[in-house]
Amino acid sequence: MSIFKSNKSKLYLQKEVSLLREEIAELKNINSKTTENNKSVIDNKNLANSIFEDAAIGMAIIDKSLKIVKYNQAFYNLFGYNDNEIVEMTYLDFIPEEKKPKAIQLFEAMFASKISKYQNEQVYYKKDKSLLWLKLTVNVINNLNGEPEYILGMGEDITESKRQENIRKVVYNISIAVNDSQSLYNLINTIKNNLKLIIDAEHFFIALYNEISDNFSVPYIIDKKESFKTFPAEKTLVGLVQKNRKSLLFDYKEILELQSAEEIFIAGNLSKQWLGVPLFNDEKVIGVIGVHSYDNENAFDNNDLILLEVLSNQISASIQKTKSEEAFKIERAYFKELFDNSPEAIAIVDNSSIIININNEFTKLFGYTKDEAINSTIEDLISTPESKDEAQNLTIEVSKGKVIKTDTKRKKKDGSIVDVSLWGTPVMLDKGQLAVYAIFRDISERVEYEKQLEEAKIKAEESDKLKTAFLTNMSHEIRTPMNAIIGFSELISDPGTDKETQKEFTKQIYNSSNMLLQLIEDIIDVSQLDSGNIKINKKSINVSGLLTDLYSKYVKEKEKERKKNIELLLHNPFGDSIAYIESDAYRFFQIFSNLLNNALKYTNSGFIEFGFDINQKDEPIFYVRDTGIGIPEDKTETIFDHFTKIEDKKILYRGTGIGLTITKKLINLLGGKIWVESNLDIGSIFYFSLPGKVILQQTSNSKSIKHINYNWIGKKILVAEDDDINFAVVKASLAFTHAHIQRVMTGEHAVKKCFNENFDLILMDLKMPVLSGIEATKQIREFNSNIPILAQTAFIHNNEKELCLMAGCNEYITKPTKSYVLLDIINKYISNGK
Ligand code: ADP
């Protein structure tokens, strides 16, 4: 069929229309015409008929019911329907569903004489369901009364030019979408919508090939019957395209043949036609784009295949681009997340030290915001003046491609210095080093920890040294009195020793024993203070009385030490009034004793003054001042540490170095503080504070200690004691009281004896064989609740006192006991006796 050029066809059209119009008018009025006109009418009719029949363009006449009452050969050629089929059809059966309402409207308007002529480009379905584009001209055909009767439609086939135009449009749209689409999905969606314009893309898919798994993934599918996410390449039509590396167009028969030859396996619905085109990237098939139809065996032809091939290049390029853009975006997102929220502070710096970017941790560590940091020189921003050169060198080294790691210091925005561990890593690109990654980690805690560790190590070494010194000292401190005790004990029993010498030896033994006892008490105190086992017994204590007692004690001590050159002075700011404070009397006495012992030890002449003053808050500040050897300034703190002794090369001072440790700990326990002021060779003042105010009580006669000689003639005392020496001490202490003493050596005997005889008092040793003192007391209490039982122990256990009192003892006395203390306690019970 020849194709008319559009202006040429226009000419024909005009001519044809006017002739047709005439012919139809004639047809209608044929019977009413006169015979003389018949010949010319028939001629005209034949002419019109032949023009209508032979016209190169499709023509059809449509009546008011939109039925096709007449059509020509060209119309048949265009659509392919025969007479029998056309009889059953209306105009609407030729056009797509969505066009129908508009067509009805148009015809109504034409039959109502509102429109006489209409021109348009219109899409139709051929009999084989393929699309047909016509350049359409419709004209109203009026009857003789001038009323619309028929419509003449004439259509010129413009499918090919329309197709070419659409292809150009589609290619253009797709190339725009390649640049604009935000994601692969959007792009494919655009491709699909555009394809619809040129081929039947009702069932459309893009499958991307994965070489490793030999599978296809389906990022996009429009299919009314199937939906896949992935499927294997093997035994599928898509797989065949991939393997053959070329476009394949199959019809229904071919698909069935492939299936029976087991070339493919299709589980679901079979297509009537299937077209797949490979997507190439370089030489590789990266996927397949396809369309298929479930109901039209002529949906696609070779032109469609070529068209899809043309598009496939565009599509693969755009898939590649979108894919790499997406991959880039993903990588960027990963990097951004990693960079922004990294636990390390990171700065990216160019080769001339200018900061390009910093992350959140950098802001947290150094205090600078992104705006403040970016474009500054990193050395100016965070280096200390001392580390500036070092920082510059590091940047230079890293920009040469080296990785640097060092621990250093950097400055924060607020000026404070922070210890950091710094990694400098070059950022490389193909062409070379691009920038520097500076990663900072705050290591202040680690540095502090290391410092503490170092200090602890030094301390441990020191304490090790001190301990060795202590043990050496201790051995000396123990051996000296022991030596005296053993030596004099031996000498005393020598028959040649006269009475006077014996007395002197006894005195030496007594003094040495006291020294040993003091040493042991100190050691126990230190260990109990360290383990927190010392309990404080606070009550109102008579400070004035205790100071007077201390004065008396140290006057004697001074004499004993033969320190006649020293004057002992007591300072009490309240004179006759008695000063009271809330504290522990025993510990108060112990603290002062330790300080006075030292003052006496380290002073050879001058004076020792002790006592107290009150501060502005009416709190007492106690002190011991001496005119002794003094303490070097750098030792005024350490002398309070365990085992610290200041060695004097010239004179050897005896001592273990624990007196001041005990003193300080006790004062702290009582809630106070101790400190010292001292000058070498001039003297020292030890001060200590205790909490609470001083309360005064006016008195006329002060108390004095009385030494009483007790007379307990006729009183019976039972002494339960397994140790001979301890019994000898008790016996000697009671010797002048004339009391009658009986001894038992076990708890069991004590119970028996008490059951059978009457006693005025029992002295009960707690640690005895067979039955302990506590058990014995319990048993005695079952039959005698009145007899005073005084428990004696050499072992100090935490809750022994409570156990003892609970068992029924009246007193708990620790050994060794000064004889007058023991007598005083016994007197309390015996004089009230039965
Ligand atoms: P020590 O048993 O050695 O006396 P301390 O703990 O009581 O132990 O005292 C520690 C050290 O403090 C002493 O070895 C001595 O060097 C110094 N010291 C304590 N008191 C005085 C003082 N009053 N005058 C001079 N030095 C003193």
Image (spheres, rainbow, N blue to C red):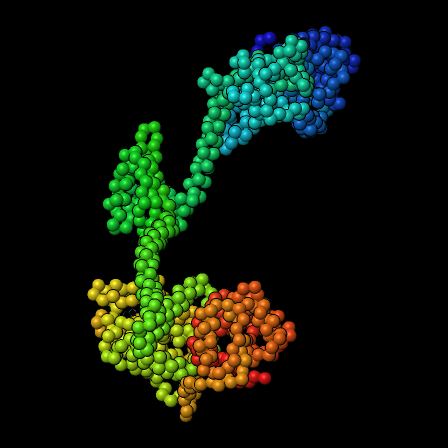
* Rendered location of residue 795, percent (x, y): 48, 66
Q: Is residue 574 above or below residue 725?
A: below
**In the image, ligand 1 is in what quadrant?**
bottom left
Residue drawn at the location 59% of the way across and 16% of the way down:
234
Residue drawn at the location 31% of the way across and 78% of the way down:
500
Task: Name the residue nearer the viewer: 786 or 489.
Answer: 489
Is residue 343 in sight in this rendering? yes
Residue drawn at the location 28% of the way across and 72% of the way down:
601
Residue most toward the right?
31
Is residue 640 in sight in this rendering? no
Q: Quadrant of the C terminus?
A: bottom right
Residue drawn at the location 34% of the way across and 32% of the way down:
428
Q: Examine the image and state in which quarter residue 548 appears.
A: bottom left
Task: Name the residue nearer the viewer: 10 or 29.
Answer: 10
Q: Is residue 491 above or below residue 549?
A: above
Q: Is residue 458 above or below residue 769?
A: above
Q: Is residue 143 left or right of residue 264?
A: right
Q: Is residue 78 left or right of residue 699?
A: right
* Rendered location of residue 820, percent (x, y): 44, 80
Q: Quadrant of the N terminus?
A: top right
* Rendered location of residue 220, percent (x, y): 58, 26
Q: Is residue 583 left or right of residue 65?
A: left
Residue most toward the front?
495
